Image: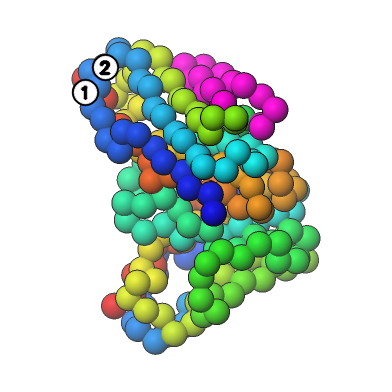
Amino acid sequence: KQEVTQIPAALSVPEGENLVLNCSFTDSAIYNLQWFRQDPGKGLTSLLLIQSSQREQTSGRLNASLDKSSGRSTLYIAASQPGDSATYLCAVYGNNRLAFGKGNQVVVIP
Amino acid sequence: DAGVTQSPTHLIKTRGQQVTLRCSPISGHKSVSWYQQVLGQGPQFIFQYYEKEERGRGNFPDRFSARQFPNYSSELNVNALLLGDSALYLCASSLESSYNEQFFGPGTRLTVL
């Protein structure tokens, strides 16, 4: 059974600092990995998709890396803004399903 | 283009009742998946349907069932509701079943009293 862990569970950073969020998974037999953002009580917004053959993906201030052999992914958010405050979820796709971590709850302090 | 839509937005039921949740995928998407998210946890996989066939089932009791219609919309049914079924139910759609990006709807908040 795939287990996904996200560390740290919660963090606060001052505005302008770079954010680094970590995700690890136990089974490297995955098709892809997605990072999502979730605002309180809302659905999930897809941020980045990394296919298993890729090493990283970038979108604006966001960059995500994938090391499938070691079962790790990292999401970098450059120059954080108060609007980046949310929960960030990592999910790996395999066996016809996404397996999620519990999320990193981020607060960016103005 | 419209994203994934779900109805209703909120629902309050009592123990023992039955509930039906609905999902419409993004136009052109053939795969629909259902997830349950309880407060403070990541979403848990319930079902995946692709071209109207069940392709995956998570570790949920038989009280949970689903189906996909010819227009690719989907329904999730939960019978004999328990207090522990209170959660945010999320629907996701994708073009195909395996390699593609998953897009989520806003969810249905189910409260069981």
Residue located at (46% from left, 25% from top): A75
CA separation in Å, label 2 and label 1: 5 Å
Question: Which numbered disc covers residue A15?
Answer: 2
**Do pointers 2 and 1 mark residues of a single chain?**
yes
Q: Is residue B78 left or right of residue A29?
A: left
Quadrant where the C terminus of chain B lies? bottom left
Query: Judging from the image, what secondary structure is the residue with disc 1 in?
Result: strand
Task: From the viewer's side, name the closer residue of A21 and B86.
Answer: A21
> In the rendered image of this protein, does residue A36 appear above or below residue A12?
below
Residue A30, quarter of picture: top right
| Quadrant (top left, top right, bottom left, bottom right) of the N terminus of chain B | top right
Q: Give percent across and percent down for residue B60.
A: 51, 70
Instruction: Tell me whether circle 2 and circle 1 mark residues in contact (CB < 8 Å).
Output: yes
Give residue A109's mark.
1
Q: Position of residue A24 (x, y in %)?
A: 46, 35
Q: Chain of mark 1?
A: A
| Residue type, label 1 | Ile
**Does residue B25 appear in the picture of this structure?**
no
Q: How many marks?
A: 2
Tell me where residue B20 appears, x and y as whole percent: 52, 74
| Magenta region | A51-67
Q: Residues within 10 Å of mark 2 (few under 14, many from 20)?
A: some
Residue A85 visible? The answer is: yes
Chain for disc number 2: A
Q: Main secondary structure of the magenta part?
A: strand
Left-right relation of A102 to A57: left
